[in-house]
Amino acid sequence: MRIDPKGTIVGYPALLVRRALRQLDLHVEWDLGRLEAVTGEGRAFVKALAAAGLVEPTRKGFWSITRAGKAVSSATAASRMKRAAAERALGEFLGRVDYVNCRPVFLAKVVEVVLFGSMLKPDVDRVSDVDLAVEIVPKESNPERARAINERRVLELELLGRSLRGFLDRELFWYWEAFRYLKGGNRVISLASLKAEAEIVLAGPHQVLYAEGAWKPNAPPRTAVVHRRRREPADDTLF
């Protein structure tokens, strides 16, 4: 699914709606306070989403994302491109998966990567995007310890002048830092949460590229990440 990056959805900027749905879909249900923390919008926004069938009430004061909302959350805003360019973008993305998983500076790791969409149609020369779904989990398996490590990382960044928007950004920093790095600012990559959108992703043609800590034999070649000027905190400062 494609959206116009300069267009609107339910009267709001399309990219704002997509970002809101992506972040809210990390939760089984959410209330108005969480919506405001994510978007800065209020009750009128959620009413517009509900009227369009993108969210639905679960109980008094709480909502969840619908299947239509999930489709919008994983939509791309990129123009169609040659398959060769899409394959390069895919190789670079897979290289970033390796990088996230092996670098202690990232508090999250990727445990599964699934490719779906037009890239699986070999007869299509111009594809709309590279549709990928990933499952991201904390590297620290103990929830309390993982929460403490995340909070310490957030505090370190704030001391360095990094500003986070609110409670949600702080609580899920471990996730969004990895997610945004994986996407790499590349509009070609349409990245979705496998945990949130498995019903849609796995219902159609798909290809598992990575799972259970290993690349599958059918996974495309990966492009190694090279950061010539990247500055990272020392690994031991995270723990």
Image: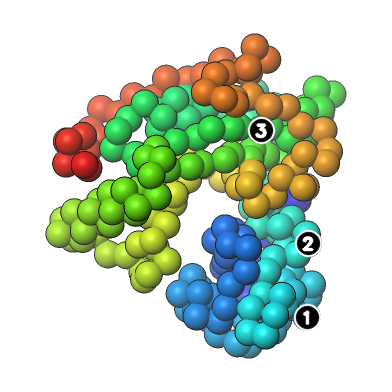
- Secondary structure of residue under mark 1: helix
Is 19 left or right of 97, judged from the image as shown? right
Question: Are the residues at dot 3 and dot 2 in contact (C-beta closer than 8 Å)?
Answer: no
* Residue type beneath disc 2: Ala
Q: Residue at x 30, y 33 (%)?
A: 104
* Residue type beneath disc 1: Ala
Q: Compare marks 3 and 2 and give the one earlier in the sequence.
A: 2
- Secondary structure of residue under mark 2: helix
Is residue 169 placed above or below 141 in the rendered structure?
Answer: below
Is 10 left or right of 22, judged from the image as shown? right
Q: Which residue is mark 1?
A: 51
In the displayed orientation, state which residue is furthest to the top: 217
For the C terminus, the quadrant is top left
Q: Residue at x 42, y 66 (%)?
A: 168
Q: Dot 2, how many residues are within 10 Å of its Cα: few (below 14), some (14-19), or many (20+)?
A: few
The picture places residue 161, in percent across and down from the top left corner, at 18, 60
Is 63 left or right of 154, judged from the image as shown? right
Q: Residue at x 75, y 42 (%)?
A: 201
